[in-house]
Image: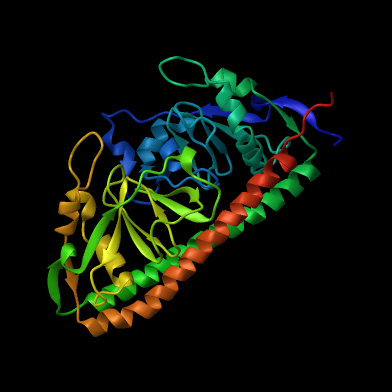
């Protein structure tokens, strides 16, 4: 392809390294949206998602103290310290990052903000290979700014950003729809649970079975989702449990509760739930377990763990059987919709990741 030119990241805009407010400046943080600024850390960046999901926000005072680090909307943020070097996100609004992230405020005469995000996403593995230091992986600001990329003409940038952006827009819309489906099911659960009922232990209505060890090296290609305590961690060709089913984190993200619409393979960091009888619908049990406070029952150790005995002793509030039955059908539909949207997103993300290098990378001739 003609017209591609070599450039350093530092030639594409202003490189800004983040910072964290001093511990003494407690008024740097706020829970309000008024006058607040996003504060982005690597933990807030999700692989394959354009926008970070900041857990904290700076107050007007905090933003003023870090004014030299303030990023506008449309800046590309790249993690450059630690095990997740190369993780990339776009700022959706004015933001400040912590010191683990270098960001580029694009020069729009040279590069489109959306194209820059996809370009640096594609360069993530190469940026990671530049890491140095024995105590911690790090790509310093100078190394980052000097990293060489190739930039196409604006028309090519626009076409690539439009194609990849359309896929990401659909993924984002699906995520919103999936969240809405879950929220609607939660509201129906609240309604079904209102009023009189009875309290019982989880062990009175269900049993917990241990998952099986299934390291990545032993997994064979297939469509069966493999569940760890944090959710899906891969796929395999053989299921251990029939779906729909409930998975409960045992180690790691102890007490987390997941729903699988399909047959699944739970690994040895989780339990999976077997209802003891047909009185309590599985869908109702899923939402009841989400409200049961299981994470608080985990042991306090370096690696939090939830024992089977503790989980089975968790208390659940059960309304009348007809209320649970009335909840089951619409909840099942909403959970199936949520799962279908997530499955579509996996396919869209795979397509985007396949197209990404061919649309934003170009190697020099020879």
Question: Which residue appears farthest toward the right when viewing the image?
Answer: 2
Residue name at image x 49 percent, y 50 percent: 236
Question: The C terminus appears in which quarter of the rendering?
Answer: top right
Seen in the picture, residue 203 relative to 248 is either above or below; the reply is below
Disc tally is 0
Regarding residue 41, the answer to whether it shows in the image is no
Q: From the viewer's perspective, is residue 128 above or below residue 122? A: above
Q: Position of residue 156 (x, y in %)?
A: 79, 43
Q: Nearer the viewer, residue 223 or 180?
A: 223
Taking the spot 75% from the left edge, 33% from the top edge, the residue there is 151
Please indicate whether residue 159 sits to the left or right of residue 26 in the image.
right
Q: Is the residue 109 above or below the residue 147 in the image? A: below
Report the quarter where the N terminus lies: top right
Residue beneath the point at 71% across and 52% down: 163
The residue at the point 72 percent across, 26 percent down is 7
Task: State the colouring used for the structure image.
Answer: rainbow
Q: Observer-nearest residue: 287 or 21?
A: 287
Residue 178: percent from left, percent from top: 47, 64
Return the x and y of residue 292 as percentages of the image width and height.
Answer: 21, 60
Q: Residue furthest bottom?
A: 322
| Residue 27: x %, y % from top left | 29, 38
87 horizontally vs 356: left or right: left
Residue toward you, 119 or 306: 306
Q: Give the farthest residue toward the top.
A: 134
């Amino acid at each position: 392809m003609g017209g591609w030119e070599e450039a350093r990241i530092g030639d594409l805009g202003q490189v800004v390294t983040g910072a964290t407010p001093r511990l003494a400046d407690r008024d740097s943080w706020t829970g309000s949206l008024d006058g607040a600024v996003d504060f982005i850390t690597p933990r807030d960046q999700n692989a394959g998602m354009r926008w970070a999901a900041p857990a904290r926000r700076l107050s007007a005072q905090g933003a003023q103290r870090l004014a030299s680090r303030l990023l506008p909307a449309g800046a590309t943020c790249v993690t450059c310290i630690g095990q997740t070097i190369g993780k990339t996100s776009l700022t959706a609004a004015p933001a400040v990052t912590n010191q683990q992230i270098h960001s580029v405020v694009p020069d729009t005469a040279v590069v489109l903000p959306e194209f820059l995000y996809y370009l640096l996403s594609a360069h993530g593995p190469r940026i990671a290979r530049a890491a140095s230091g024995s105590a911690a992986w790090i790509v310093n600001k100078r190394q980052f700014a000097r990293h060489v990329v190739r930039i196409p003409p604006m028309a090519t940038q626009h076409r690539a950003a439009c194609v990849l952006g359309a896929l990401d827009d659909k993924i984002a819309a699906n995520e919103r729809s999936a969240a809405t489906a879950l929220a609607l099911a939660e509201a129906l659960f609240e309604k079904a649970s209102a009023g009189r009922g009875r309290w019982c232990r989880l062990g009175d209505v269900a049993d917990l079975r241990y998952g099986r060890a299934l390291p990545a090296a032993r997994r064979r290609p297939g469509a069966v989702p493999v569940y760890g305590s944090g959710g899906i961690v891969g796929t395999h060709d053989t299921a251990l449990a029939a779906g729909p089913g409930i998975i409960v984190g045992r180690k790691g993200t102890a007490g987390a509760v997941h729903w699988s619409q399909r047959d699944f393979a739970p690994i040895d960091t989780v339990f999976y739930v077997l209802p003891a009888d047909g009185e309590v619908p599985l869908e109702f049990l899923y939402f009841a377990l989400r409200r049961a406070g299981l994470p608080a029952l985990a042991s306090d150790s370096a690696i939090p763990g939830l024992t089977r005995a503790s989980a089975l002793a968790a208390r659940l509030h059960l309304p009348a059987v007809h209320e649970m039955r009335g909840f089951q059908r619409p909840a099942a539909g909403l959970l199936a919709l949520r799962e279908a949207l997530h499955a579509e997103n996996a396919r869209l993300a795979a397509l985007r990741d396949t197209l990404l290098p061919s649309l934003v990378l170009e190697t020099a001739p020879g």
